[in-house]
Image: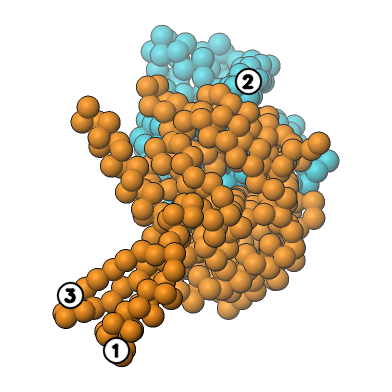
Chain colours: A cyan, B orange
């Protein structure tokens, strides 16, 4: 009970810190929105994707990029933001200080995850508003689509957070954290159907990307935001929502185990 | 019989071939302020971090508030206050926000406003920590160390970067904590600080405790023999004697009047400490030469 109370107190504290830290807000919070704008503007004259031969139907590039950007936001807020943030806190002595207080480790995790969840909800809301009103993207209206959105989003963000916490053990210093974390998330975004059309990647690369959770987050979001007619473009010809849940679940459990094994307030004897 | 709040026996800590702490033993009694003195790299911080639970020992027995710090749980941590030697957080929160938040962690915290007042930051309460000077940030560290009303307070070089006035304020704060019965372990490079605050001190050199005792006895009686200095015919003289007044009287008689630049002093803690450190490095140099 006390752990939850302190977790809530941490969430508020973390949110305050997050939004006061100008650079990280810019890069991780606005990044998906900026990227969507870049793609939407760059391809604004390219016509619609999946249009009939007479040019009717299909969707705009902006609409096509929405699910990828939503998924990228989920990944970045969790993995990149927390991976770098926690490695930094390890480096600057924040964790050492907390380790000397009666704060439970789990409350600290709750604070991080809660902070990411709240900021991600704001981020995705802003992203969808920009897509709808700046780039005229049609958003789904069916309640079951939004139900799918809700669980994929929640599940995906929490999985990302747990992986970010686990990944923060990797950099040896706070300063090297960005150098370790950013290439990993950047590579994943390119092979997982965020920037490049997943259907057009070679089969072996699709298979490789399918090991990692981002591909499944993006696929889950495509099922929400793309029309039914796009389902056949998936490698299996289906949105495979069951598999989306399964793979994210496996990564969540794996990440939790990693955190359990690797997370320490400080490296003893370093 | 219950153990002292801090009980250390034959503590040894080695990193590979290097022995940082080489078999030290001491107790800190309830309500006592104990100063651990020694040059940089002597093993002070390693010792204090073992007691705080940050490092594991290689061998020896350690008990802090009745618990082995290697297995200290949250209830144990709730009774400790820790002021680390260095802190470098970005500090995008105000002094008031930081202390209010940390007060939540403890079952019976002090009043936030009183703690801010005690460390002299009332006027800076609504300033972000990142905007404070080094000495002011250090006061925030001290405030965070005492917010949880600790039974045992660790102060690792707490006044580094303080101006003289802030140091006096800090001393007054520590005296107040002592009056409330807080047990304190202090390390400092300011020997006047140790002399003012501590009841007892231990001196660590090269990982070994070379002396331990009440502040006004440490170094032994010989190290405390008063020193008489004067000037005669333009030449400086000095003599150590247990009867300084008698010597002064004799000089007065011989000079048949006032003695030029007469001075009688007792070695300060700093003199005694420097003497011990000097002796130790001499022995080490000789051992190295053999």
Indicate whether B131 appears above or below A52. below
Q: Residues within 10 Å of mark 3 (few under 14, many from 20)?
A: few
Q: Nearer the viewer, residue A255 or A86?
A: A86
Which of pointers 2 and 3 indicates the residue nearer the eye?
A: 3
Residue at the far top: name it: A204
Q: Is residue A2 above or below residue A26?
A: above
Work out which quarter of the rendered image holds the C terminus of chain B and state it.
Answer: top left
Q: CA distance from mark 2 to mark 1?
A: 88 Å
Left or right: residue A263 versus residue B104 is left
Disc 1: which residue: B256
A261 is higher (above) or lower (below) than B122: above
Identify the image quadrant of the N terminus of chain B.
top right
Given residues B129 and A29, the one toward you in this image is B129
Q: Mark 2: which secondary structure?
A: helix
Query: What residue is at 61 percent from the left and 58 percent from the top?
Result: B199
Q: Which residue is mark 3?
A: B235
């Amino acid at each position: 009970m006390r752990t939850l109370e302190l977790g809530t107190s941490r969430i508020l504290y973390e949110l305050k810190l997050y939004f006061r830290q100008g650079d990280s807000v810019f890069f991780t919070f606005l990044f998906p929105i900026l990227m969507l704008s870049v793609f939407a503007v760059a391809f604004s004259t390219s016509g619609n994707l999946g249009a009939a031969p007479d040019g009717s139907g299909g969707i705009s590039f902006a609409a096509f990029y929405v699910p990828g950007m939503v998924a990228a936001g989920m990944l970045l807020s969790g993995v990149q933001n927390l991976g770098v943030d926690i490695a930094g806190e390890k480096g600057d002595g924040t964790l050492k200080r907390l380790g000397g207080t009666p704060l439970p480790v789990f409350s600290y995790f709750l604070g991080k995850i809660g902070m990411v969840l709240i900021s991600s909800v704001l981020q995705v809301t802003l992203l969808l508003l920009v897509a709808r009103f700046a780039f005229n993207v049609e958003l789904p209206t069916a309640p079951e689509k939004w139900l799918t959105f809700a669980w994929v989003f929640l599940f995906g963000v929490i999985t990302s957070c747990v992986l970010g916490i686990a990944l923060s053990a990797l950099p040896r210093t706070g300063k090297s954290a960005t150098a370790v974390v950013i290439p990993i998330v950047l590579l994943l975004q390119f092979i997982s159907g965020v920037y490049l059309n997943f259907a057009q990647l070679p089969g072996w690369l699709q298979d490789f990307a399918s090991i990692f959770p981002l591909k499944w987050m993006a696929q889950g979001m495509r099922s929400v935001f793309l029309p039914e007619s796009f389902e056949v473009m998936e490698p299996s010809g289906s949105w495979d929502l069951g598999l989306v849940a399964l793979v994210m679940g496996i990564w969540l459990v794996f990440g939790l185990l990693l955190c359990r094994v690797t997370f320490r307030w400080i490296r003893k004897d370093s | 019989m219950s153990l002292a709040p801090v009980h250390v026996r034959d503590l040894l800590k080695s990193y590979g071939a290097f022995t940082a702490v080489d078999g030290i033993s001491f107790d800190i009694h309830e309500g006592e302020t104990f100063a651990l003195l020694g040059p940089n790299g002597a093993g002070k911080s390693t010792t204090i971090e073992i007691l705080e639970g940050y490092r594991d020992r290689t061998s020896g027995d350690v008990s802090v508030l009745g618990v082995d710090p290697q297995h200290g749980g949250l209830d144990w941590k709730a009774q400790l206050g820790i002021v680390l030697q260095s802190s470098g957080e970005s500090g995008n929160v105000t002094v008031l926000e930081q202390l209010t938040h940390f007060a939540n962690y403890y079952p019976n915290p002090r009043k936030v406003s009183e703690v801010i007042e005690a460390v002299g930051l009332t006027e800076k309460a609504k300033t972000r920590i990142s905007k404070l000077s080094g000495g002011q940030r250090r006061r925030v560290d001290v405030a965070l160390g005492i917010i949880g009303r600790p039974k045992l307070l660790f102060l690792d070089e707490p006044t580094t970067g303080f101006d003289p006035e802030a140091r006096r304020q800090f001393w007054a704060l520590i005296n107040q904590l002592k009056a409330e019965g807080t047990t304190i372990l202090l390390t400092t490079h300011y020997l006047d600080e140790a002399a003012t605050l501590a009841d007892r001190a231990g001196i660590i050199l090269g990982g070994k405790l070379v002396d331990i005792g009440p502040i006004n006895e440490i170094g032994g009686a010989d190290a405390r023999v008063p020193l008489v200095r004067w000037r005669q015919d333009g030449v400086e003289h000095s003599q150590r004697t247990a009867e300084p007044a008698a010597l002064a009287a004799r000089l007065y008689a011989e000079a048949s009047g006032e003695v030029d630049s007469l001075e009688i002093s007792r070695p300060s803690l700093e003199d005694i400490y420097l003497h011990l450190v000097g002796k130790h490095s001499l022995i080490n140099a000789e051992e190295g030469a053999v």
